[in-house]
Amino acid sequence: MPAMTIRWLSIAIITLCGLLTACMHGQMAGLPRPVPNEPVGEVVVIRTSSVVGATNSYLITIDGRRAWGLRVGEYARVKIGVGAHRVGVECFGGWAPIWRESGAAEFRLEPDRTSYLLVAPDLTCASIKAITEEEGRDWISRGKPSAQE
């Protein structure tokens, strides 16, 4: 195959992958809704600003359901019922062109409290970890709300 054809084919594939992952953005149907009159807490998920993975949205899951997509430098907050929860991050691509979970954080949400989670690119896709309220507020001050805010 001529070098020019390979170059254009590569550009087309990269563009298509970027379009497929960029459209997964903002709030999704899996976002849990609090039960009326039940205690709730707040979860804030923050995605770092980085050149690595900059063209891709990361899908954030709550208790196994896709809740929203985050782009570089965005954060999202949601009120959910108190108790044990699992927040994960899914990425598109790798060796298989599918969405797959890369990392997750398990925690117990307390009434009227806020839990902060930070999503950052890593060697396989992305990692997610709990951070302090002070760290969370600092990241939020430098970020922007996601489309669901």
Image: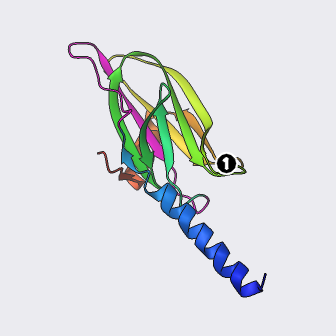
Which quadrant of the rendered structure holds the C terminus?
Answer: top left
Give the residue displayed 61% in from the left and 46% down from the top.
98
Q: Residue furthest right?
A: 1
Q: Is residue 86 above or below residue 147?
A: above
Instruction: Give the amino acid at mark 1.
Output: Asp
- Please state which of residues 9 and 107 is positioned toward the viewer in this rendering: 9
Instruction: Decide whether residue 36 is among the magenta residues.
Output: yes
Q: How many marks?
A: 1
Instruction: Decide whether residue 125 is among the magenta residues.
Output: no
- At label 1, counting other C-alpha atoms closer than 10 Å, the crowd grade (few under 14, some 14-19, many 20 or more) is few
Q: Residue furthest front?
A: 1
Kindly indicate the quadrant of the structure image that contains residue 109.
Answer: top left
Give the residue displayed 58% in from the left and 63% down from the top.
51
- Say what secondary structure mark 1 lies in: loop
Which quadrant of the rendered structure holds the N terminus?
Answer: bottom right
| Residue tagged 1 | 122
Q: Which residues are magenta?
A: 29-52
Q: Is residue 34 above or below residue 26?
A: above
Q: Residue furthest left?
A: 37
Tell me: 133 left or right of 38.
right
Give the residue displayed 52% in from the left and 35% down from the top.
131
- Please state which of residues 66 and 10 is positioned toward the viewer in this rendering: 10
Tell me: 7 left or right of 142.
right
Q: Main secondary structure of the magenta part?
A: loop
Q: How is colour applied across the structure in the image?
A: rainbow
Residue 73 locus on image (x, y percent)? 45, 55
Q: Is residue 31 above or below residue 122?
A: above
Residue 53 locus on image (x, y percent)? 59, 58
